[in-house]
Every structure is written in C-alpha cells, then in structure tokens.
Amino acid sequence: MKTYIKNSGILAMCIATLSSCQQEEPLTGTTVTLDCDYFQQDRVLVDDPDVSIDYLITCNMSVDADITVMPGVTIAFATDAGIVVQETGSFKAEGTAAQPITFTGQDGVKGSWRGVIVYSNDPKNSFDHCVVEHAGGIAHNSNGDRGAFIVWAEGRLSLTNSTVTLSASHGLNATYRDAWLELGGNSFTQNDGAPLYMDYDYVDVPSSTDSYTGNGNPRILVGSNGQTIETNKAWKKVNVDYEVEAGVTITVSEGGILTVEPGVNAYFGAGSQLKIIDEAALSAIGTTSQPIGFYGSVEVNGAWAGIEIRHTSNVQNALDNVTVAYAGGGDLDGAIYMWADPTISVTNSQISNSGSCAFYDGGTGGGNPNLSVNNVTFSNNSGADYCED
C-alpha cells in the first residue's frame, strides 16, 4: 500500500481543470492493464493509493493524443514494452517531491522494457519528479536506437528533477538534430551505457544541476549527425567529462562561436577533431583552478586529429589555460593545424604528445602573422613546436 493519503475530491477538481475532454481512468483497487490502443485519445492516469502498481503496459504503446499522468502514479512495463510519443501526441508526467511518478519494469531487471521515444515536438512533453528505471532494452526502431529516453529529430522533451537509473543502455539518447531539450535537477546513474548520448550540437544541454556519475560509460558520449554549429553555443561544465566518438568532426562554421566553459575535459576518439572554419571561433578560456583539457581517448601520440582552424579572422579564437594532448594524428600535421593564416591566440597552455608537430601552418608559408603565442609549454611531441609548408 502506498504511504500517502489522497483527497479524491480535491484531485477530481484538479483533473477537471486539466481538460474537459480528457478521460480519467476510474479507480479499481487493482492494477489496470491498459489496452494497446488506450492512448489513441486524451487520457488522465490517476493514482490509486490501494495498489503498488497503478497501470501495466504490455506493448510498445503508441501515444497519438494528449496523455497526463498525475502525481503518485506507478506504471509498470511488461517485457519489451515501451512508450512511443507520436508527432500528433504529447506525454505529460509531472509528479512532486512527495509524490513522484514511477516508470518501472515489471520484471525488475535492467532492460526489461524499451523506454520512451519522443517524435512529438509538443511543449507539453514533460517529465518532472519521475523515476524511470529498468528501461533501455531492445531497440525502438530499425536504426537500433536504445535508451531510457530517446528524442527524435525535431522532438521536444523537458526532463527535470527526475532519476533515470538501471537502464541497460544510455540514460538519454539524443543523437538527432533540431530537437528541443531541457534538463535540470536530474540524476542519471547505474545505467549500463552513458548518462547522455547526444549529438555535438547539444553540448549546451547538460545541466550543472544534474548528476551524471556512476554509469557504465563514465562520460557523456558525443556523436554527430552530420551538421555543423552555426550559432553561439556554450559547451557546459558538469560533474563528469565528455567523450567524443571516433571519427566525429565537431565543426563550427558561418560565424558561430563555440565557448568551452572552464573545467571542461573532452576525450577524443581516433580520427575525431575540432574544426573551426568560415569566420567561426573556438573560445576555450580556462583558469588556473579550472583548466580546459582536450585529450585523446587513449594515451598514444596522435590518438586524435586535433584542432583545425581555417579561413577565420574572428578575434575570439583563443585558448587560455588549455591542455591539448595526444592530438596531431590522421590527416592533420599538427595538434593545432592552421590554414590560410587564421586568427588565434594561445596562452598559458600546453601542447603535448602530438603525433606530429605542435602548431602547423599550411597554405601560405612564411609563418602565421595572426597567431599569438605566450607562455605555452611543449613536451613529448613527435614533431617540432612549429612547422609550415
């Protein structure tokens, strides 16, 4: 039996104000197994204090209408079941600190259900004060997408003050572009994958009020869906580091500015790189107490490509209190590769374990007059401190 008492009269009044056309599931004193077409019309799911599990979902439930889940509700999912919020639907599950909403696997084991995939961009898509556990099972689609939450291209999800735990995959999977994401006050922990797996366009989404520790992959995993950053964006400092997948090129172009917050550490897989082009800028200004680190995922000279800067005179291109380590691999001939005399300032930093040179100036010869270097330490690089065509 649940440990709180519900005032059914007040609750009924509150539900009535939500929508005059939403249908409230009546209390039965037993767990209600929902039909697989139950979310084809607007519904309100209410808590029954006399049962530990209010509702059971036995299929991959399609949401084509507006669904509201009230505080205190517990929904269990049978093996391989899940929730698919279609473009025409919305899903609002807003609990309270005293009455959280729980989404759990009927079997009580990791991966026993799929999780929630969101195709809808409805602003009502909200999970607040929720517990989402045992999800991340089989893939939701032919793309193989797995996670407790998956947000599709142009989908919308607000996830706040919630716990995402015991997923057999990632906590949140957001690798498609043009989604709207809000995070804050969450705990992602004990998931077999990464706490977050996201396209690099969402490096401004992780929240300093979230906790991302205690997962199978201890870092936030950063991938790419093939587009570029063309606006001003901040790469957020949180309580774990970032890991950029092998082969991913984080490209900033069209005058966009990628600002890396002090204390960010990013580990780059083989062949990955930061690429700044077409009047864009990389502003990585650390401090002595919170330096910024760009490292290889493995500690081998040339483990990742490095930082490529070309065709930009943007004066905000600056690295201060930054370590660039194990870069200079692949097609780049330096840990920091410059083409056509780009503007860049590098100060109070160190470049180490490059698989080639530290700086490489290509395309012009005669040195880069727009490079400013002060108090930079070079160590264990395979090539010279400065090379050029």
Image: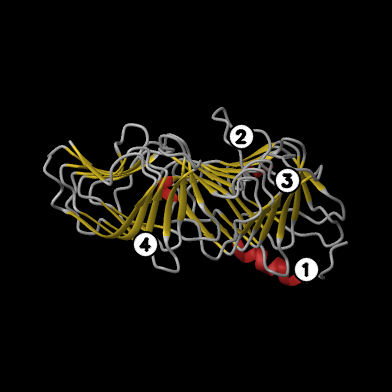
Q: Amino acid at mark 1?
A: Ser
Question: Which sits in the foreground, 311 or 136?
Answer: 311
Residue 246 in the image, given as x and y percentages of width and height: 46, 36
Q: Earlier in the sequence, mark 3 or mark 1?
A: 1
- Distance CA(mark 4)–CA(mark 3): 41 Å
CB within 8 Å, label 1 to label 2:
no
Badge 3 is on which residue? Answer: 134
- What residue lies at 68% left-to-right and 37% top-to-bottom? 137
Badge 4 is on which residue? Answer: 321
Badge 1 is on which residue? Answer: 8
**Secondary structure found at label 3:** loop
Question: Which sits in the foreground, 78 or 43?
Answer: 78
- Distance CA(mark 1)–CA(mark 2): 37 Å
Residue 73 in the image, given as x and y percentages of width and height: 74, 58
Quarter of the image with the N terminus in it: bottom right
Q: Nearer the viewer, mark 4 or mark 3?
A: 4
- The label shown at residue 140 is 2
Query: Can I make out residue 330 in this image?
Result: yes
Dot 4, how many residues are within 10 Å of its Cα: few (below 14), some (14-19), or many (20+)? many
- Distance CA(mark 3)–CA(mark 1): 31 Å
Q: Amino acid at mark 3?
A: His
CB within 8 Å, label 2 to label 4:
no
